[in-house]
Image (cartoon, helix red, strand yellow):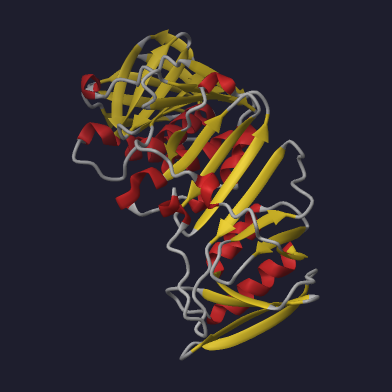
Amino acid sequence: MEITIQQSDLAFAVGTALGSVPAKSTLTILQSLLLEVQDGGLRITGTDLDVTTSVTVPCTVKSGGRAAVQARHFSDAVRKLPRDSVRVADEDGGLTVFYGKGKSQVPRLDDQDFPMTPDVKPEGRISIDGPVLARLIQRTAYAVSSDETRAVLNGVYFAASDKELTLVATDGHRLARARRAGSFGALGKDGFVVPGRTVTMLGRMAAEATSPVEIGLAPARNQAAFRMKVGAYDVVVYTRLLEGPFPNYEQVIPKTNQKTLTVARGEMREAIDRVSTHSDNITHQVRLDIAPGKVTVRVNTTDVGSGEETLDGRYDDEALSVAYNANYLLDILKSLDSERAVVRLDKPTNAGVIEPDGGLADKEEELLCLIMPLRLPETNEVAMAGAGRRG
C-alpha cells in the first residue's frame, strides 16, 4: 500500500470510524481500524460487531492494499500531524505516515482477522434529508431506556409508511414520538428498532450530511445500513437491529386529557432548572401547582432545601397539582422548538402530554411527548407503572 492523502481527509476518516471501535474488548482485532485502498479512495472501517462504520475519502494511489492498525494509537498519531499532504506506505512491517521532514510509524496487525463488512442487500430503500433525520433523532433519542432487562426499549423505533416516517422512544417513564410527512413505504409497514448508541452516532453524522441519508433494511430485518455523504466523504453505518416487538405505544397515549396549560417554553425550562436544584437526587421530583392564569413550580426536600417560582400560564380549568421528574421535563422542553408549550392533563396520577403550541416550525413535522407523574406525598394513589409496560 502506498497513497498520498491530505491530513484533514485522513483525520476525518479515522475519527469517524473510531466511533464504532469499542473502548475495551477481549478480541484485540476489534480495537483496530482496517485501511483499504480501493477505486481511487481510502476506506477506513471500525466495528464492534454490532455497529460498523466505513468512511471513504479521496487519495492519490500509487499501489493498493490493506492494513489493520491499533485504532486509538493510530488516531492520536494522525491527529497530531501537520495539516498538509502526507504519504502513507508499508515499511518494515509497519504502516508509516511520512510528513514534512518527519515520519510516524505504527505496527500492523493481521488484517485477515478483521471482521467482514456486513453485506446488507436491502429489500427496500428510502431517503431522507440529513438535517431532518438529525432533528427526528434529537427529539426522541433522550427517551431511550438504559434498562437492559427490556432490550427492545434500548433503541429508537423506526416506522415507515406511504404517509410518514415515525420515530419513537420510551423508557417506561416517558415517551417521545416524532413524525415527518412523506412517502416512506419502501421499508414496509413493520417497524424496526435501531440501538441507542447507533442512533446517537447517526444523529451527529446526519446533521453534517450534504446528501440525503439512504436507509436500507436487510431482507432478514436484522440489519440496517445508513449511507450518506459528508462533504466529499462517503459514510456508511451498518447496525444490528434490536429484536422483539416494540410496545404498542399508541395505546398509552392519552386521548382524553382535557385540561390544557399553555406556558412560555423557555421560562418554564429556566424555572424548573432553578427550582430543581433543591430536588431529591433520586427522584428529582418537582411539583406543579396549576391554577387559572398561572403555574407554580415547587420543591421542598428535607435536608436539601426548597424553592418555588410562579409563571404566567393560560389555564382555565379547576386547580390541579401534579409532580414529575425534573430532568425528564427539561429533556422534553428542550426537544420542542416552539415559543410556547402545551401541557395536556387529566388526573394527577395519569400521564401528561406535552406538545409544541401551534406545532413545529416545519409544518411537515410533528412531535408528541408523554411523561408519567410521580406520587405526591398527600395522595395515596400510585403513579402508573410506565408506558413501556402497557404495550
Q: Position of residue 17 (x, y in %)?
A: 42, 32
Q: How many marks?
A: 0
Q: Position of residue 59 (x, y in %)?
A: 50, 16
Residue sitting nearer the eye, 15 or 144: 144
Q: Residue furthest bottom?
A: 303
Residue 201 in view? no
Question: Does residue 91 appear to the left or right of 173 in the view shown?
Answer: left
Image x and y of residue 349, in percent: 54, 70
Which of these two is toward me, 170 or 362?
Answer: 170
User: Above or below — where is 111 with respect to 8?
Assistant: above
Q: Residue furthest front?
A: 256
Which residue does the image show at 32% across and 41% down from the upper left?
22
Give residue 196's quadrant in the image.
Answer: top left
In front of the other: 357 or 308: 357
Considering the image in quadrants, where does the N terminus appear? top left
Quadrant of residue 311 within the rendered picture:
bottom right
Residue 160 location, x and y as percent? 56, 29
Say whether residue 235 is visible.
Answer: yes
| Residue projecting furthest to the left | 26
Q: Residue at x 42, y 43 (%)?
A: 197
Left or right: 276 in relation to 199: right
| Residue under the image location 63 percent in, 39 percent down | 179
Residue 352 or residue 366, whichever sits in front: 352
Q: Looking at the image, which residue is at 66% across and 28% down?
A: 163
